[in-house]
Amino acid sequence: MDYQQISCSLFDRIESLAVTKRIVEITYISDETENNTVKGFIKNVFSENKAEYLLINGVTIRLDKIKSIKEL
């Protein structure tokens, strides 16, 4: 599936959470069908192969697969 660009406001929020090292809970879709949740702080936000990702607790998540981000 091609990457679907996320809104600028969501991207700005993700970057802000990463820079300030806030603890977050992210719910995201993996393998197109399964919802997963990971908690921690965002270690990196980056682009690769025309898509944007974040790294949290050793898990790489494509930004357009994020269902929710909650600050803890």
Image (cartoon, rainbow, N blue to C red):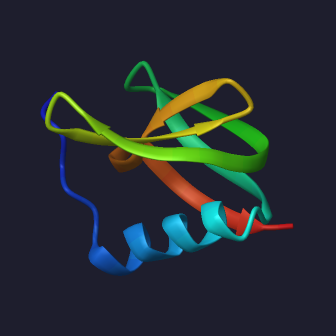
Judge left or right: residue 51 versus residue 46.
left
**Within the image, what quadrant is residue 49 found in?**
top left
Residue at screen point 72% across, 66% down: 70
Q: Is residue 25 above or below residue 54?
A: below
Residue 19 percent across, percent down from the top left: 63, 66
Residue 24 percent across, percent down from the top left: 76, 58
Q: Is residue 4 above or below residue 11?
A: above
Residue 58 percent across, percent down from the top left: 68, 24
Report how many numbered discs are placed on residues in the image. 0
Quarter holding the C terminus?
bottom right
The residue at the far front in this view is: 19
Residue 22 percent across, percent down from the top left: 78, 66
The residue at the far top in this view is: 31
The residue at the far bottom in this view is: 9
Judge left or right: residue 25 versus residue 34.
right
Residue at screen point 57% across, 36% down: 55
Q: Is residue 68 above or below residue 49?
A: below
Residue at screen point 71% across, 39% down: 37
Q: Is residue 45 above or below residue 20?
A: above
Judge left or right: residue 35 versus residue 9.
right
Quarter holding the N terminus?
top left
Judge left or right: residue 72 versus residue 3.
right
Camera-nearest residue between 41 and 69: 41
Residue at screen point 55% across, 44% down: 44
